[in-house]
Amino acid sequence: MSKIVLFANTDWYLYNFRLSLAHALRDAGNEVILLSPPGNYGAELISLGYKWIPVPMNRRSLNPLRELSLVIWLARLLRNEQPDLVHGFTIKCAVYGSLSARLAGVRARVNAIAGMGYVFSSLDMKARVLRPIVRSVMRFALRGQSSAVILQNPDDYTIFRDANIVDENAIRLIKGSGVNIERFKPKDDECASQNDEPLRVVLAGRLLWDKGIAEYIEASRILKKEGRSVRFILAGAPDSGNPASIDEASLQGWISEGLVEWRGHVQDMPGLYAGCDVAVLPSYREGLPKSMIEAAACGLPLVITDAPGCREVVSVNGQDGLVVPVRDSRALANAIRLLDEDRSLARKLGMAARQKVLAEFDERIVITRTLGVYRELLESEWVSVAATEGTAQ
């Protein structure tokens, strides 16, 4: 058996997105170490029996000396722990995890890029200046023997291939982190709103401008001016570690104007979706949006943008969801209006979305493929596909 390190930029990410992977690894007899900056979920991870180590990492830091010291700190930690494989999630953790693992002589490295992030999705000057620099750093850090890059959608695959960031043979395409289909399932009929009740529309995710929240708010304004009683629900919290985070003044202004109901951070996501009728995500770019996969698993119809990552969730407009152009609040309002007027279409799209999740996004499929990458790099038989059975929480 082996020792595996999972390294993410928040403990919340480890707890919400990769806990089932950690369970599968541990159930197969492997030792699992979890790394992330300090947060509210570290204690939860420890209570589940995992070794969680807080990392002195500032997600927004661009100070070269500070970043170099972090890589050295990580290399020392890995040298002491002597893991067999390090798996980093998101760009910064993948780059730093890979660099420090190479310095520490770790046998294998897996680098999961869950979306290209602020640097690649934002149009502001800071992001555009950083983009070529980040590409060069990624090219240096992610190459090498016994290393693989996991991407979540074909658009990111094309970027990596065309920019020659890593050898094409080192890229693996795995659709997100999957969803627990037993925990996220369609609501009871009595939870569904009737045709004469206000349609409940939810956008769940970090409160970032590039999630299309401005377009969501404008769609609410458009429909409310028409006299429609559609309820716009916003679930999530601002992310101070991301330059694209929504400011408090804007959020409070929308609430005061009656454009949105803000739920803040929601722990019970199945409960949130049970009280909603439609899920939307007008994002500019994603890796593969887990919130929408969870909503689809709950049988909610989806409205999503024609953007990288989002295209993987709704394949055919009008068949397993509705697709609107990026940064188009009018089109978003039109799609929501359609579902408000045609509740039978909403139910049909919701059922189709659930079937797509069962076929493609069941977390057991994702875990099996991820363990296959580990096995390939470590060239041994220590991971059993059967270990993924029963990992649902």
Image (cartoon, rainbow, N blue to C red):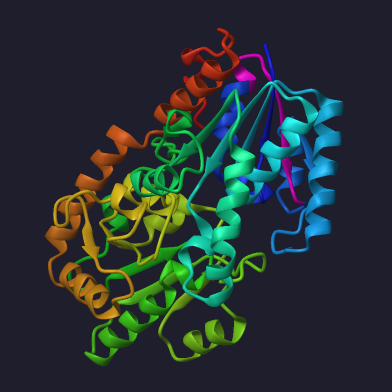
Q: Please determine whether, in this image, residue 355 is positioned above or below residue 137.
A: above
For residue 295: magenta?
Answer: no
For residue 33: magenta?
Answer: yes
Q: Please determine whether, in this image, residue 105 is positioned above or below residue 382.
A: below
Q: Which of 282 and 348 is in front in this view?
A: 282
State which quadrant residue 86 falls in: top right
Magenta extent: 26-37
> What residue is shown at x 47% (from left), y 73% (from top)?
123
Relative to 126, 83 lies left or right? right
Total count of labels: 0
Residue 161 picture location, percent across and down: 41, 42
Relative to 347, 286 lies left or right? right
Q: Nearer the viewer, residue 50 or 69?
A: 69
Residue 375 picture location, percent across and down: 54, 16
Task: Answer whether residue 197 is visible to the viewer in this image.
Answer: no
> What residue is shown at x 35% (from left), y 62% (from top)?
276
Residue 317 picture location, percent across and down: 17, 56
Q: Which of 205 and 243 is in front in this view?
A: 243
> What residue is shown at x 39% (from left), y 80% (from top)?
217
Quarter in which the N terminus is drawn: top right
> What residue is shown at x 85% (from left), y 43% (from top)?
73
Task: Answer whether residue 373 is visible to the viewer in this image.
Answer: yes
Residue 57 picture location, percent across and down: 77, 53
